[in-house]
Image: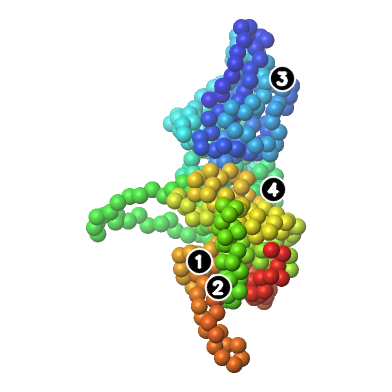
């Protein structure tokens, strides 16, 4: 799994430990650094933890030795072949002898081996460790002694859906196992709901104090399992697996839908003049290699709305009792791809004109359709826009992209008669659907925000285009 170069003498070998094959991902963030320069490590001891989407994997050392140099830090982005550390290998005979003398008999059971193939780790079917004891119980000393290693975590969307397993790194899983904590009962506070060390300790303190902690997976709902139905009894069927993106996003969408009190405010914007301006400047955009779409005007209007209504540019903290107000303006754009819906993020939209935004939008949308988005390109959004205008419809209820508190849905514009006080005139009207988190935003604020967006699109030249 780990590539290295080796000299002629075991005692003085300097080994380069590199990032192994991580499948189709070009850049993966480092979410945990488990060692420091100067640390002594045993063979197969984990050095760092990498994260891709909702999957994590640890990179171990191939042999025992001392970390001579550490070349990565927390939040670094690495790719296959990137040098993680320089290891000075220990003498193999000494290592085996010392390990045999110090390792408890109960810890000699081998951990499941994993092989990475095409970005998916296949886990060996060796017996799994015994389940942890409940919080508050005491494990025998022999069961916690020694330097235990957690089993590899499969880099497989089907195995890492929130409904099936907790979102935590192997190091956190090991920490939770040592405390006897069932991670599916812990609510994660990090980006995307990932469980960190503080979440586990907070859960333990809460359990010891007798406080009730809701399970992260069911959000307090005691729902029966889905019925098993043999559909082939009623006619011919065909089984078609969900795409990887559908599997990952499905869990997020389900959690957001049942965990956030959604309300949707609908409005109409008169975009007759805006559309005339857009078409008049279409040739200018074409010369630069992209199209000037209505989306860029919606982005600018959304930024103006977030500046006018700061509550919409916020997120609830992990306690649910405070708002984190953001001073930056990153807008997520839902992109329909052959494999499912993804939401890349355009950054610092307040600092760019419509032509810069149009160029970036064309570029990142193509990357999304080609399946080449990096994890960082889908993180950090403040507010999302989902446009179905190119397909049709009059309105819909978009699901909020947590931890954001609102999302704008856009349907197809159409010519409608509008009364000007004397007569009806044909005007191009654009339907807007604003879904918002009712814990943070009340109905009156949402109606004002939607009307403000419509007003900005109607008076588009007042925006910083």
Distance of label 4 from label 1 (alpha carbons): 46 Å
Q: Residue at x 59, y 33 (%)?
A: 79
The residue wearing badge 3 is 68
The mark nearer the N terminus, 4 or 1, is: 4
Label pair 4/2, CB-CB below 8 angstroms: no
Name the front one of labels 2 and 3: 2
- Residue under label 4, please give it: 202
Q: Marks 4 and 3, how far apart in space? A: 35 Å
Residue closer to the observer: 449 or 214: 449
Mark 1 in CB contact with mark 2 (< 8 angstroms) = yes
Q: Which residue is mark 2?
A: 430
Residue 40 can be seen, yes or no: no
Q: Earlier in the sequence, mark 1 or mark 3?
A: 3
Tell me where residue 82 appears, x and y as whole percent.
62, 28
Q: Nearer the viewer, mark 1 or mark 3?
A: 1
Q: The C terminus appears in which quarter of the rendering?
A: bottom right
Q: Which residue is mark 1?
A: 389
Does 361 sit above or below residue 115? Answer: below
Cα separation, mark 1 vs mark 2, equals: 9 Å
Q: SS of the residue at dot 3?
A: strand
Residue 158 drawn at (x, y percent)? 46, 44
């Amino acid at each position: 799994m780990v590539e290295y170069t080796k000299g002629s003498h075991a005692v003085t070998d300097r080994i380069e430990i590199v990032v192994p094959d991580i499948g189709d991902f070009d850049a993966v963030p480092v979410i945990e650094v488990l060692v420091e320069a100067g640390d002594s490590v045993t063979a197969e001891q984990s050095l760092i933890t990498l994260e891709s989407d909702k999957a994590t994997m640890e990179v171990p050392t191939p042999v025992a030795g001392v970390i001579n140099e550490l070349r990565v830090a927390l939040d670094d982005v690495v790719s296959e072949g990137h040098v993680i550390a320089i290891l000075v290998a220990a003498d193999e005979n000494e290592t085996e002898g010392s390990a045999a003398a110090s390792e408890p008999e109960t810890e000699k059971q081998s951990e499941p081996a994993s092989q990475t193939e095409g970005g998916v780790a296949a886990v060996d079917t060796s017996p799994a460790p015994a389940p942890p004891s409940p919080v508050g119980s005491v494990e025998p000393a022999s069961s916690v002694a020694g330097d235990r290693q957690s089993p590899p975590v499969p880099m497989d969307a089907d195995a890492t859906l929130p409904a099936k397993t907790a979102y935590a790194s192997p190091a956190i899983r090991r920490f939770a196992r040592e405390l006897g904590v069932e991670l599916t009962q812990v609510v994660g506070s990090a980006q995307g709901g990932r469980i960190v060390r503080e979440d586990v300790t907070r859960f333990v303190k809460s359990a010891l104090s007798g406080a009730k902690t809701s399970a992260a997976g069911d959000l307090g709902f005691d729902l029966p399992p889905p019925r098993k139905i043999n559909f082939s009894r009623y006619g011919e069927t065909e089984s078609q697996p969900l795409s990887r993106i559908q599997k990952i996003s499905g869990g997020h969408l389900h959690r957001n839908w049942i965990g956030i009190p959604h309300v949707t405010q609908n409005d109409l914007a008169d975009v007759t003049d805006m559309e005339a301006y857009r078409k008049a400047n279409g040739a200018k955009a074409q010369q630069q290699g992209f199209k000037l779409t209505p989306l860029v005007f919606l982005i600018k209007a959304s930024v103006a709305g977030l500046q006018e209504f700061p509550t919409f540019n916020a997120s609830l903290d992990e306690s649910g009792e405070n708002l984190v107000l953001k001073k930056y303006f990153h807008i997520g754009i839902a992109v329909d791809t052959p494999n499912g819906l993804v939401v890349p993020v355009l950054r610092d939209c307040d600092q760019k004109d419509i032509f810069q935004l149009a160029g970036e939008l064309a570029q990142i949308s193509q990357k999304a359709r080609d399946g080449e988005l990096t994890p960082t390109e889908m993180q950090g959004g403040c507010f999302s826009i989902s446009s179905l205008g190119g397909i049709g419809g009059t309105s819909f209820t978009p699901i909020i992209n947590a931890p954001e508190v609102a999302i704008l849905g856009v349907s197809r514009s159409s010519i409608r008669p509008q009364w000007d006080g004397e007569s009806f005139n044909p005007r191009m009207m654009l339907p807007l659907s604003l879904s918002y988190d009712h814990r943070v935003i009340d109905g009156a604020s949402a109606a004002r925000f939607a009307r403000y967006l419509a007003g900005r699109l109607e008076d588009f030249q007042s925006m910083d285009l």
